[in-house]
Amino acid sequence: MRIAIVGSGGVGGYFGGRLAEAGADVTFLARGAHLDALRTRGLRILSPKGDLRLPRVSATDDPRAIGPADIVLFAVKLYDTEGALAALPPLLGPDTAVIPLQNGVDSVDILTRAIGAAHTAGGTCYVSAVIAEPGVIRHTAMDHLLFGEVDGSRSPRLERFLDACRPASFKSTLSTNITVDIWTKFTRLSVFSGMTAVTRSSVGVIVDDPDLMAMLKAAVTEARDVAHAKGIAVPADIAEDVARAYSALPPQARASMAEDLERGRRLELPWLSGAVVRIGKQVGVPTPIHCFIATVLKPFVDGKM
């Protein structure tokens, strides 16, 4: 099975590296200093599960050099989506599945319009990982990859991908209800990203403060209610589940959006808390906490001025 990683940052670099470690045929599509480091020094992953060093990896900035792949993991930042779509046609064979591992809830629709429903699968993941420096991924918590056909079927191509994932040292799930999984992740992550960014804090600070935890749970409830208004069966008890899950995270964990804010990079805010607010207005659900988060962080959406 040939696997191409489009967007080789924290998410793509982590899962691609673990797949390569397990023996999968993986090629990273990258650019700039990160690409140079992958070509010259390979890939390193720093992780509480154990560090990994791959002295040699396949990496390029030209999708034509990769050619048709069986699976494409599409893991670019949401604000880079439109530009990255141009990389996909050379990677598509007759049965290629493109699996978006982006935040938010818009990726499946965007990919379907760009490359067609036949090549578009659904996907999401739970992982806290960032580029620490070119060629180095720092992983701090979680590593669960979920993917599935949009129609809920267990297709042969995704069964084969599941087989490729099994030897890798992360949890993998072939889902038969990937839309609910995507929205459940969105409900969780929009809050995790918004709260760690707006407080400039790690999750441990939030968990230890009753007022911040109350705010977090209220924000989860808002996003859940938006999903329910759209007819998407996000679990009703997700607020309590999120509170338990975040209490179990390493206290230093925080979302990549918080890292991006600290480094003066662009933010995925319009597709996270901003999307909760936007979709909430469409379905008539009030979202005051997410509106606060989106408003306070708005000056930093395009990075430092």
Image (spheres, rainbow, N blue to C red):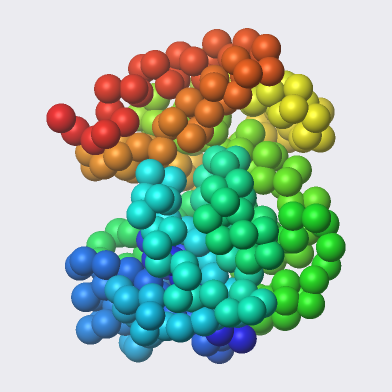
Q: From the viewer's perspective, is residue 233 above or below residue 226?
A: below
Residue in the image at 76% along x and 22% along y: 229
Q: Position of residue 211 (x, y in %)?
A: 54, 14
The single residue placed furthest to the left in the displayed view is 305
Residue in the image at 68% along x and 65% along y: 118
Q: From the viewer's perspective, is residue 92 above or below residue 40?
A: above
* 31 sits left or right of 207 in the view: left
Q: Nearer the viewer, residue 292 or 2?
A: 2
* 252 sits left or right of 208 in the view: left
Answer whether residue 2 is visible to the viewer in this image.
yes
Q: Position of residue 183 (x, y in %)?
A: 68, 39
Q: Quadrant of the rendered structure where residue 283 is?
A: top right
Quarter holding the C terminus is top left
Answer whether residue 20 is visible to the viewer in this image.
no
Q: Position of residue 206 (x, y in %)?
A: 50, 27
Q: Nearer the viewer, residue 196 or 64?
A: 64
